[in-house]
Image: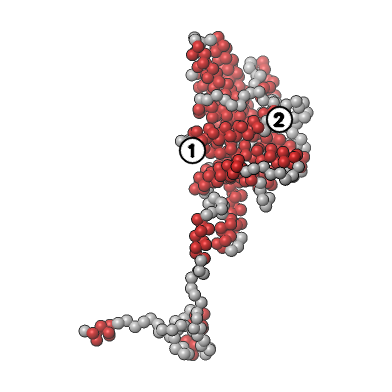
Amino acid sequence: GDQSGRGMRKRPRQNPGPACQQCRLRKLRCDRQTPCNGCLDAGVECNVDPTPPQRGPKKGHLKALRSRIGRPSRPPGTQRESTCFLHGGSPLEHQADTWDRKRDQLYFDRIHAFVPAIHHRRYLQRSRVALPTPSHRCLQYAMWTMASAMSSQFHHLRDSLYRGTLDLLHALDDARPTTAGTAATTDNDDEASLLAQAQAWILVAVYEFVQLPSSFRRAWASVGRAIRLVQLLRLSEMDAGDDHDAAVLDFTTPYNGDTDVDVCIEREERRRTFWVAFCLDRFASALSGLPLTLGELISTRLPCPEPAFQSATSVVMPLLSEIMETTDMDAEPRALSAPSSPWVECIVFCTLWGRALSHQQRSKLEHFHGPVAVAFRERQVRLDELLTSRMRLFQQRYAPGAVKSDPMLLFTNLVAQATVLSLCK
């Protein structure tokens, strides 16, 4: 039995000892002879290295990789540093830049129509610098968060980008101001930073309202952060004291990075940021039943039409108070002659929505003190007349097909219907 067991033992696949260098290079099985049969048949010298190179990664390399993966410096999908470390080159860094550009374009394709506060080319110009400012980085992440939420390609990144946006915004709050630069330069830098932060908080609030409906308190707090920054910048008083000519946006030439044109575009961005916050305040109040934060004592002109904004074209816009004076049929031709746009229509109906919400809140207090007052009936009739007049103007300006095809007009129509329901309560 012992002899048969020995006979059944399998012979090793190869003889002991290292393979020769030639067989290693040609990926052949070496018979470990000196010289081996492979080298004899090929007529080459057979050399054997008694200390072949060690296989596998170098000592400590895997540990370094694991520690780097465990501590990402940027949210997933934007880790330029780690991709360069792993691959030792720039192809994946270029791919990360491509993803950033795709998210930028997704934002302007799908989100900008509802939050039209940012100038496309000016944003791209600031984004392509080697070291964007921390406040602009916050705005970028907020825009990418919204773009990812509306994209099947980047949808899985929305939560990590959202958390990254909050981390960057809170880091700005914790940062201390530096003493470098003159006082004027520091003030200008602070205002630009606060504007970008306000825009970022607006986008964060919109994301939380839409994507995190169970976190209403968080969204409400984000709206408050944005509105306080808007108030701190006094964006509701931008055109106070300006005459009609001074309010003209000096967009006489196409945008090419010129400083004067850039300043005018920034002023329009500030106007638009205020009006986005104004509409968002009405939306948040409708959801919460709490009083409005931003009133109608506004000396900032309405935003110019979107094509004029993006192409840097001169447009004179009226004040909200001038538009809201239209309350009867005799005044309608004047209202029709005023410059308008889908967003201006939205602002007008958001204003009426806010008035209806305030009317409800005041009526509750009046009912608490006694029977329905005469002031309540007068406000109700005045709001109903103004709403009817504005809806008639809206229908004259925009055909049903145009309303269905334009997202801002469609949203405006929903706001108008919500205002009607508010008055019926």
Amino acid on which the number 2 mark rests in the picture: Met
Quarter containing the N terminus: bottom left
In this view, 179 is above or below 8: above
The structure residue drawn at horizontal position 40% and vertical position 84%, both measured from the top left corner, is 15
Residue 311 figure quarter:
top right
User: Mark 1 or mark 2, which has the lower sequence index?
Assistant: 1
Q: Which mark is residue 238?
A: 2
**Crowd band around label 2 with a 10 angstrom C-alpha radius: few (<14), some (14–19), many (20+):** some
Assign a secondary structure to mark 1: loop
| Residue 2 horizontal/vertical position (percent) | 23, 85
Q: Which residue is mark 1?
A: 212
Asked whether the residues under the numbered discs 1 and 2 touch, taking CB atoms below 8 Å apart as contact, a structural biologist would say no
| Image quarter of residue 355 | top right
In the visual, does 24 lie left or right of 328?
Answer: left
Kind of residue indicated by mark 1: Leu
Circle 1 packing at 10 Å, graded few (<14), some (14-19), many (20+), is few
Q: Is residue 83 visible?
A: yes
User: Which of 116/58 is in front?
Assistant: 58
Place of residue 75 in the rendered image (x, y in percent of width and height, measured from the top left): 54, 50
Residue 81: mark in rendering: none
- The answer to whether one can see residue 404 in this image is no
> Residue drawn 76% across and 27% down?
242
Q: Position of residue 133 (x, y in %)?
A: 66, 46
Q: How far apart are labels 1 and 2 at the CA level?
A: 34 Å
- Residue 259 higher or lower than 71, as above or below: above
Q: Secondary structure at mark 2?
A: loop
Name the residue at 52% across, 37% down. Answer: 208
Q: Position of residue 337 (x, y in %)?
A: 70, 24
